Amino acid sequence: MAARREEGVVHVRCDDMLTSAAAAAVLGISVGQFRRLASVLNVEPDATKKNPVYRTAAPMALWYKATIVERFRSAVALSRDLDA
């Protein structure tokens, strides 16, 4: 995990992480589907970041690519098989 330590606090490097929208695009599903899938699978984001556009909005969820592949890919493939 790429991180830096500053005054005893570990800061995750956000440059190597995906937003929920980017993670959904990797999986080929909508952002809404991605969020529902994360909720159903009980998967928490790897990190959060203050929303740069809306200061009063909820923090942005950030995901490592490995988390997307390990935790979501099989569930998305399984749901597509059930639809067919």
Image: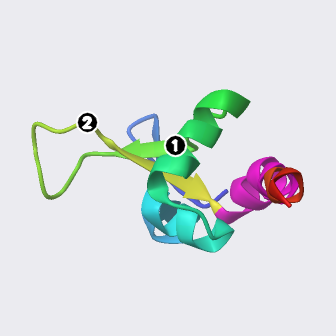
Quadrant assignment, res 43 = top right
Q: Is residue 56 visible?
A: yes
Residue 21 percent location from the top left of the image: 44, 63
- The mark lying in front, picked from 1 and 2, is 1
Q: Sequence order check: which comes first, mark 1 or mark 2?
A: 1
The residue sitting at 75% across, 51% down in the picture is 72
The answer to whether 33 is drawn above or below residue 43 in the figure is: below
Residue at label 1?
Answer: 35
What amino acid is found at the position of numbered circle 1 in the picture?
A: Arg
Is 3 displayed left or right of 28 in the figure?
left
- Residue 68: say if magenta: yes
> How crowded is the residue under tag 2: few (<14 C-alpha within 10 Å), some, or many (20+)?
few
Calculate the distance from the C-alpha at mark 1 to the C-alpha at mark 2: 14 Å
Of residue 38 and residue 44, the one placed in the foreground of this image is 38
Q: Magenta stretch mostly in which secondary structure? A: helix
The residue sitting at 67% across, 64% down in the picture is 65
Quadrant assignment, res 46 = top right
What amino acid is found at the position of numbered circle 2 in the picture?
A: Ala
Q: Quadrant of the N terminus?
A: bottom right
Dot 1 and dot 2 residues touching (CB under 8 Å): no
Which span of residues is magenta-colored?
A: 65-78
